[in-house]
Amino acid sequence: MGEAPSQTGNRAKHVAIIMDGNGRWAKRKHLPRAMGHKRGVEAVRALIRSVEPMGLDCLTLYAFSSENWKRPEDEVDDLMDLMRKFIKSDLPEFIANDVRLKIIGDWQGLAPDIVKSLEDALEKTSGGSRTLAVALNYGSQQEIARAAAKAAAIGEVTEASITAHLDTNDLPPLDLLIRTSGEVRLSNFLLWQCAYAEMLFVDTLWPDFTPEHLQTALDDFAIRERRFGGR
Ligand code: IPE
Ligand code: IPE
Ligand code: MG
């Protein structure tokens, strides 16, 4: 009989999620893709409320990649509209939940009205004690290239200096990366930050992902043995 895994009691402080599977969720229900994205936003909302009770310092969500511009224009428009609505409707919720909003990626490249409302939301939530980092127009290779260029400009191309110039420089080290929908790839997300992160790939499609699924992931993380190259 195998031994029961020992409870190492790791507590995840920073969890990142690749929220994938909205399209397949809609397809299975014979609904338009846009409905999948809409329900995906609802899953995000429920999760934000669980950041504090689950003891997370930071939750980072992959919302729109630098490669997602390749999608048909109407889908990109739908996603941008959802983003617009979400920032407006959920800002009071962020403030009430003591959540500091942070955006990673090349978000200044989004439509000017979105940039403006993000700036407003960043300012209004700046006092929050827990962070919700949203990756918008984000590509990890581009982020690393930007950070390396800044490190080079000060003549210090070191691991520490590149880390310090990443968009995530004020976030805690990444403990756990989750991807939903059964795909097992990183799709240009947090490549540098994943160096020693634990990873969990689940089959659940994003709109079906609940705070209970996150709790299960945290329980799984708690019993993993993290070695960081030691023994
Ligand atoms: C994730 O769901 C949402 C974004 C990438 C914006 P998808 O739209 O990728 O859903 P699938 O992968 O096609 O099911
Ligand atoms: C990754 O999902 C991007 C987001 C979840 C925002 P994709 O659906 O875009 O990834 P690929 O194309 O399957 O790799
Ligand atoms: Mg996908």
Image (spheres, helix red, strand yellow):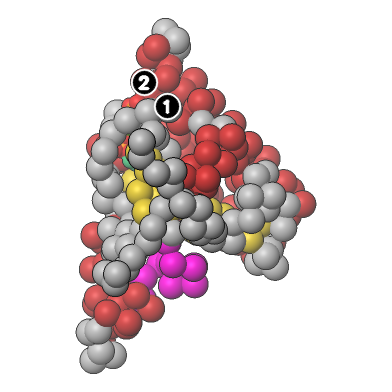
Which residue is label 2 attached to?
A: 24
Question: Looking at mark 1, is its residue's CB closer than 8 Å to ligand 1?
Answer: yes
Q: Residues within 10 Å of mark 2 (few under 14, many from 20)?
A: some
Instruction: Say whether residue 184 is visible.
Output: yes
In percent of the image, x 68 and y 40: which residue is there?
89
In percent of the image, x 30 and y 77: which residue is there?
162
**Magenta segment: does it hold 17?**
no
Magenta-colored span: 165-174
| Contact, mark 2 vs mark 1 (Cβ under 8 Å) | yes
- Along the line of sight, the residue nearer the viewer: 18 or 134: 18
Q: Residues within 10 Å of mark 1 (few under 14, many from 20)?
A: many
Instruction: Say whether residue 112 is visible.
Output: no
Mark earlier in primary sequence (2, 1): 2
Look at the magenta stretch and give its main secondary structure.
Answer: loop
Question: Looking at mark 2, is its residue's CB closer than 8 Å to ligand 1?
Answer: yes
Which residue is label 1 attached to?
A: 205
Q: Work out which residue is located at the far front of the displayed protein and give it.
A: 1
Q: Is residue 136 left or right of residue 50?
A: left
- Along the line of sight, the residue nearer the viewer: 217 or 46: 217
In percent of the image, x 25 and y 89: which residue is there?
156
In percent of the image, x 27 and y 79: which residue is there?
159
Residue 187 found in image quarter: top left
Q: What residue type is disc 1 on?
A: Leu
Please identify the quadrant where the C terminus is shown.
bottom left
**What secondary structure is found at the residue carrying circle 1?**
loop
* Residue 8 location (% of width, % of height): 49, 58
Q: What residue type is disc 2 on?
A: Arg
Observer-side mark, 2 or 1, equals 1
Q: Is residue 66 left or right of residue 85?
A: left
